[in-house]
Image (tube, grey):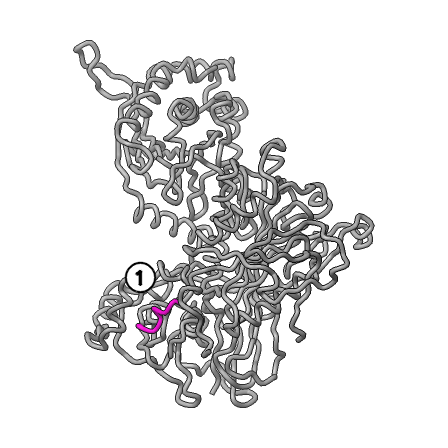
Amino acid sequence: MNGRRDPQRAQEIEVCQLGLVPYGEALAIQRELRERRLAGEIADVLLLLEHPPTYTRGRRASAAELPFPVSFYEARGAEVHATDRGGRITYHGPGQLVGYPIMAVGDVHLHLRTMERAIITALGEAGVTAHSRHEEGPDYTGVWVQERKIASLGVHVSRGISTHGFAVNLENDLEPFSWVIACGLPDVAMTSLAAETAGTGERLGCFRKRMAYAFCAAHGRRQRLVTPARLGIAPRDPSRPALRRAPQDHGVSEPIAAYSVAVPR
Amino acid sequence: MGEVIVMPRLSDTMEEGTILRWLLAEGETVARGQELVEIETDKATMTYESDQAGVLHLIAAEGETLPVGQPIANVGELDGAGTGAAPQAESPGASGAPAAPANGAPAPTAAPPGGEAAPRDGAGGRIKASPLARRIAREGGVDLGSLHGSGPGGRIVKADVLGSPTAASPAAPAALVPAAPAPAAPAVAASGPVGTAPRAPDEIARAKGETREIELSRLQQTVARRMAESKATIPDFTLQIEIDMEDCVALRAQLKGLANPAEAGEHAPAASEAVPTYNDMVVKAVALALREHPLANGSYRDGKVQLHSRINVGVAVAAEGALVVPTVFDAEEKSLGEIARETRALAARVRDGSITPPELGGGTFTVSNLGMYGISSFAAIINPPQAAILSVGALAPRAVVRDEEIVARHTMSLTLVSDHRILYGAEAARFLARVRELLEAPAALAL
């Protein structure tokens, strides 16, 4: 193989459901996949997952955005991580759908706008009218329902390959957002699919499928569902109970727990 | 000799970037292709690889935000190599003149295709190419050396790479392909018609005397971009109507009397502040009419019409060197007095610069008024993605025919410019007629 991929496959984005993954592990997975994508070993990938309660700080997050000591957040069962993505501080927790596209990105703004468009489409199909506000400035990047924020974006691009991505609030607890200055906007109100539909909306398992489809469609490409094993992501500790099972495709049955990268660096 | 590294354009829409972190320190040696600096634009951080080799001299500090094209570092062969010596067209050098790409020129793709081969740096054989072009070329397996650059100084730009036969391979990111402008083709097909600009422009420039360039602020750049987008993409049409404002004049006199019983006239600002203007009446009438004509309150996005549950009327206000449109949210639910107070407060905040982005966004319709300058009628530019904009002319007594006699009446012209993708002629006409109805019998406005 000379590194050039099959043309058919290049039109596809491989979508992989990982279930609930601790933030640090997800970071390691992304970095590994970025190297493999850079080497041309894998196609563009969209990882869909959830995180346990975690605060992540982007490169420009200021100290004031985390108003309490780290111990305050840890006492409430949340981890605090510094990351290399763009943007400020945000919160991740179970019930929020996180998407990490590991893909070749030519134009970073286009990448952000395409993600916004895909999220708006998926939410629209789930009955929530959302919109982009990027015209109002970089702090307003994300997806909004009127003046309430429903999805956040933050990406990192290194050697033309993206990591990090988007997070859509579906049925997660929104209170932890109020313990920080989310996105660096002091008065931003967060919302979720559940809040917008008075709890009658789609659950994560259903919305996840819409999101994957809308993301690939926004890029004008098709999705191919792949298992974590296929991407070389293997369960790290099979004894850990599966908190949420990722859907299985191709008839391959796997215990889904926490993942680590199979290939040692 | 030293080479200047400038703030790279990492996106067609990027205007400025923030230096987040230097990955190499002052005085270190950088290799071509080595990751040099991490830059943030919008909510993306990006590592930028050096396209030059040598000893690094930092110009921009971490945390600095600079427009595209501004120098951020020098790369020299030796310590203390000249910094301002770089003759590159893209580098502003030491003169302090603003770099051409920073002026919001819509990306180098707009440059006329020139036939010159991509110039190489004498010493290192480096090919001049934009970071975006470099990236696409690498992704698509295109050899930059085989291309001709159509950018400034023969620099290879995105269009050159996308237009190359090898770039058509499916490995090129699909998302970029639709953006490929047609002019890319001739640039590659032929090194033929070289449109080397003759000296004429210089002579023309001299005929205009001294030329001074004015930098556009971020706000002005945004206005420029959105107005051009509006004119270039919206199939608009214009409807005009005359309003008999006699009843509104009477209503305003009544409201003035209520607010200021002493009848002191216009000299008591505290009292006159509460009296709604004719523009406020137009805003209220428009809001009520929008409730009955939801399409006029809609937006056009991605081939679909969006209807909005809230009626938020933007009122165009001329501010310091720019035009901004503060928004009266839920205008149809507000009384005339509330609208008057709110627009006045918003206009004041525009002028003192304390207005916040949420107050400027969220509008679903715009009213623009030049009547105070005596303009009898005009057609404003639609504020995308809104469906229409209403232009208000001057109110004045004019000769009109009433009951077959010529009489003097206070009249005012309203001009509606609509996006035909959302509003068709008849619907726009019905909306405008409804606005007239409300203004000619303004009792409903006073409720």
For the view shown, which residue lies furthest in the left direction? B404
Q: Quadrant of the C terminus of chain A?
A: bottom right
> Which residue is at a point 45% across and 69% down the rendered structure image?
B69
Q: Is residue A260 magenta?
A: no
Which amino acid type corresponds to the residue marked 1 in the rendered image?
Pro
Q: Which residues are magenta?
A: B165-171
**Picture layout, residue B16 above or below residue A127:** below
Task: In this rendered view, identify the residue nearer to me: B247 or B142.
Answer: B142
In the rendered image, residue A10, in percent from the top left (x then y), is placed at 43, 65
The chain letter for the residue carrying disc 1 is: B
**Picture layout, residue B433 above or below residue A258:** above
Q: Is residue B375 visible?
A: yes
**Picture layout, residue B4 above or below residue A174:** below
**Local secondary structure at mark 1:** loop
Task: In this rendered view, identify the residue nearer to me: A33 or B283.
Answer: A33
Q: Which residue is mark 1?
A: B181
Q: Is residue A154 visible?
A: no
In the rendered image, residue B223, in percent from the top left (x then y), is placed at 41, 48
> Which residue is at a point 59% across and 58% down the rendered structure image?
A252
**Picture layout, residue B137 above or below residue B297:** below
Horizontally, residue B291 falls left or right of residue A69, namely left
In the rendered image, residue A82, in percent from the top left (x then y), is placed at 69, 61
